[in-house]
Image (cartoon, rainbow, N blue to C red):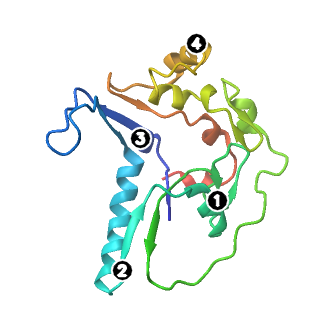
């Protein structure tokens, strides 16, 4: 299932400082991490799970299956040069979640068209050069740098760009980098409110 992300606010990530579990998690957890779009997607998925449950089908939502691969195989779009799923209508401006169910559903054909074709705007726009066609060098990604502040595999030059370019509304939050998404021409006209 895909959700059109038409505003950068959907890319907000928040860490709860001094998280101690409060009886729900282990006491050694240092923080709890929230990504706004996952919270929205889980809410929408619960509605579908509830709908299916009321009709007698076992169902649950999942973020743990390979969502991009599943989206391509389910016909939602193709894997773009940015490694994101590119849909014909919204380009890479979608977030994904899956609902697993015992309900019998019609099968869609995998998406086979390469919507990127000769375009390389996402590759050239990435300030850290984290993208090769259809491959992400995760240790060069500014979003990975922001979500992994203590990881030793991120180069200092990437950390410096992250400090300069990633917007941080508060000391415990940041808005994920969307440069590769912003420059993609596919679906751009459909993704503005």
Q: Mark 2 falls on what kind of element?
A: helix
Label 1: how many residues lie within 10 Å, few (<14), some (14-19) or many (20+)? many
Q: Quadrant of residue 36?
A: top left
Q: Which comes sooner in the sequence, label 1 or label 4?
A: 1
Disc marking residue 9 = 3
Residue 56, compared with residue 126, is above or below; it is below
Q: Which residue is mark 2?
A: 52
Label 3: how many residues lie within 10 Å, few (<14), some (14-19) or many (20+)? few
Q: Mark 3 falls on what kind of element?
A: helix
Please report the residue visible at 78 percent of the width from the left and 57 percent of the height from the top. 114
Disc marking residue 5 = none
Q: Quadrant of residue 22?
A: top left
Q: Mark 4 falls on what kind of element?
A: helix
Label 2: how many residues lie within 10 Å, few (<14), some (14-19) or many (20+)? some
Q: Pointer 1 and pointer 4: residues touching (CB < 8 Å)?
A: no
Q: Which residue is mark 4?
A: 156
What percent of the width, then of the height, locates residue 54?
Answer: 28, 83
**Label 2 – label 1 distance at C-alpha:** 26 Å
Please report the residue visible at 34 percent of the width from the left and 34 percent of the height from the top. 14
Disc marking residue 87 = 1
Image position of 35 (left or right of 3): left
Mark closer to the observer (3, 4): 4
**Label 1 – label 4 distance at C-alpha:** 34 Å
Q: Mark 1 falls on what kind of element?
A: loop
Residue 10, compared with residue 56, is above or below; it is above
Q: Which comes sooner in the sequence, label 2 or label 1?
A: 2
Image position of 73 (left or right of 34): right
**Label 4 – label 2 distance at C-alpha:** 48 Å
């Amino acid at each position: 299932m895909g959700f059109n992300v038409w505003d950068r606010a959907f890319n907000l990530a928040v860490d709860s400082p001094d998280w101690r579990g409060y009886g729900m998690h282990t006491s050694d957890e240092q923080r709890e991490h929230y990504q706004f779009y996952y919270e929205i997607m889980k809410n929408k998925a619960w509605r579908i799970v509830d709908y299916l449950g009321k009709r007698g089908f076992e169902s649950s939502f999942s973020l743990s299956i390979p969502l991009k691969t599943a989206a391509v195989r389910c016909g939602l779009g193709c894997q773009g040069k940015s490694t994101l799923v590119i849909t014909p209508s919204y380009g890479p401006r979608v977030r994904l979640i899956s609902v697993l169910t015992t309900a019998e559903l019609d099968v869609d054909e995998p998406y086979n068209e390469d919507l990127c074709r000769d375009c390389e705007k996402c590759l050239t726009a990435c300030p850290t050069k984290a993208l090769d066609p259809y491959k992400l060098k995760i240790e060069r990604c500014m979003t990975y740098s922001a979500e992994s502040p203590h990881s030793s595999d991120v180069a200092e030059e990437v950390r410096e760009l992250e400090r300069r370019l990633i917007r941080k509304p508060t000391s415990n939050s940041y808005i994920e980098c969307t440069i590769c998404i912003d420059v993609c021409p596919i679906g751009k006209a459909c993704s503005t409110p």
